[in-house]
């Protein structure tokens, strides 16, 4: 671009010099030295200023063309990006599936008991948070503690499963039903003879339920207690048969004293 600008400036200078020379040749006598020098000097000045002005105009024109070309390219790029964005559907964000730890299985008989026990404990936990009476909440907490031990016993001793199923199918659901009734009554926020009487009866029943749950838990250890007694009895008999438990008499028997006649 600079070369083209200089070339156009030179052409303009030559043209202006020639025109100026032709005009001044009619005015000054070129056959005389002063006329020749005057014509050449004025022509050179005109050519210089004309060439300079032409160069400036050419530079401004090039700047305008450059800016317009850059703007056109930018608009073309933006339009191409817009068209590509419109043409290509937005990619849906990839969501990783939540990683959950696999549940431990204890067998087809024990797993349903564990699941049912967890559901019951969850419901009692909800009731614990909903009921505001501190005395009742303490009793619910004790019921939850014993219930968890009863449910976990299915893992420790599968022979107790029939007793645990009976506990889960009747005793525990009935207790939870009464607790839900207490929760609804206490949420009324009013006092009445029937409400107070029913809530008091349920509160007293919770003490009975706690004792019953403890006895049920204790009964699950009947078989283990029997096995322990049997093992202890067998061990004692084996030790006795081997003579490992018999007491040995290490005392020295006292000799009878001899009479005077026996000594003689």
Image (cartoon, rainbow, N blue to C red):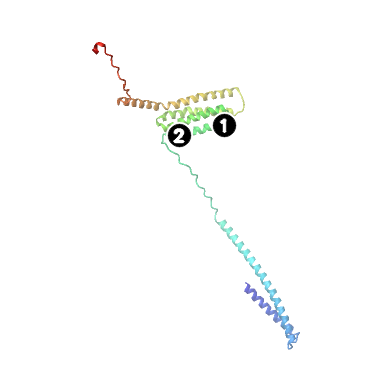
Which is nearer the eye, 243 or 250?
250
Which is nearer the eye, 91 or 144?
144
Cα gap from disc 2 to disc 1, whole angstroms: 24 Å
Question: Farthest front residue?
Answer: 264
Residue 31 drawn at (x, y percent):
73, 88
User: Could you say which quadrant of the image residue 183 lies in?
Assistant: top right
In the image, is residue 195 above or below residue 44?
A: above
- In the picture, the disc for residue 130 is 1
Say few, some or many: other residues with alpha carbon within 10 Å of mark 1 (under 14 / 14 to 19 / 20 or more): some
Say few, some or many: other residues with alpha carbon within 10 Å of mark 2 (under 14 / 14 to 19 / 20 or more): some
- The residue that appears at 44% across and 29% down in the rendered structure is 164
Apparent side of residue 102 relative to residue 84 in the rendered image (left or right) = left
Residue 204 drawn at (x, y percent):
53, 23
Apparent side of residue 251 relative to residue 130 in the rendered image (left or right) = left
User: Could you say which quadrant of the image residue 14 lies in?
Assistant: bottom right
Residue 113 drawn at (x, y percent):
44, 33
Question: Farthest left residue?
Answer: 264
Question: Farthest top residue?
Answer: 261
From the image, tell me which residue sits under label 2. 114
**The C terminus - image quarter:** top left
- The residue that appears at 54% across and 24% down in the rendered structure is 203
The number of discs equals 2
Secondary structure at badge 1 equals: helix
**The N terminus - image quarter:** bottom right
- In the picture, the disc for residue 247 is none
Label 2 vs 1, first from the N-terminus:
2
Residue 18 drawn at (x, y percent):
70, 81
In the image, is residue 84 above or below residue 63?
A: above
Secondary structure at badge 2 equals: helix
């Amino acid at each position: 671009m600079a070369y083209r600008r200089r070339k156009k400036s030179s052409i303009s200078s030559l043209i202006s010099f020639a025109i100026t020379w032709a005009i001044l040749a009619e005015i000054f006598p070129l056959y005389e030295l002063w006329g020749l020098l005057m014509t050449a000097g004025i022509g050179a000045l005109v050519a210089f200023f004309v060439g300079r002005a032409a160069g400036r105009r050419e530079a401004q024109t090039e700047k305008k063309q450059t800016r317009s070309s850059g703007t056109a390219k930018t608009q073309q790029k933006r339009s191409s990006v817009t068209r590509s964005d419109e043409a290509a559907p937005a990619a849906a964000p990839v969501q990783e599936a939540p990683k959950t730890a696999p549940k431990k299985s204890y067998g087809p008989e024990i797993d349903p008991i564990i699941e049912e026990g967890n559901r019951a404990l969850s419901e009692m936990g909800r009731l614990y948070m909903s009921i505001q009476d501190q005395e009742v909440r303490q009793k619910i907490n004790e019921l939850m503690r014993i219930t968890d031990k009863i449910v976990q016993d299915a893992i420790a001793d599968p022979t107790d499963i029939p007793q645990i199923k009976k506990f889960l199918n009747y005793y525990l659901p009935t207790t939870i039903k009464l607790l839900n009734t207490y929760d609804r009554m206490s949420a009324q926020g009013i006092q009445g003879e029937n409400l107070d009487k029913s809530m008091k009866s349920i509160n007293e029943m919770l003490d009975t339920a706690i004792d019953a749950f403890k006895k049920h838990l204790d009964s699950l250890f009947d078989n283990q207690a029997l096995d322990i007694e049997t093992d202890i009895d067998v061990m004692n008999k084996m030790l006795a048969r081997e003579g490992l438990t018999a007491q040995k008499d290490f005392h020295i028997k006292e000799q009878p004293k001899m009479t005077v006649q026996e000594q003689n």
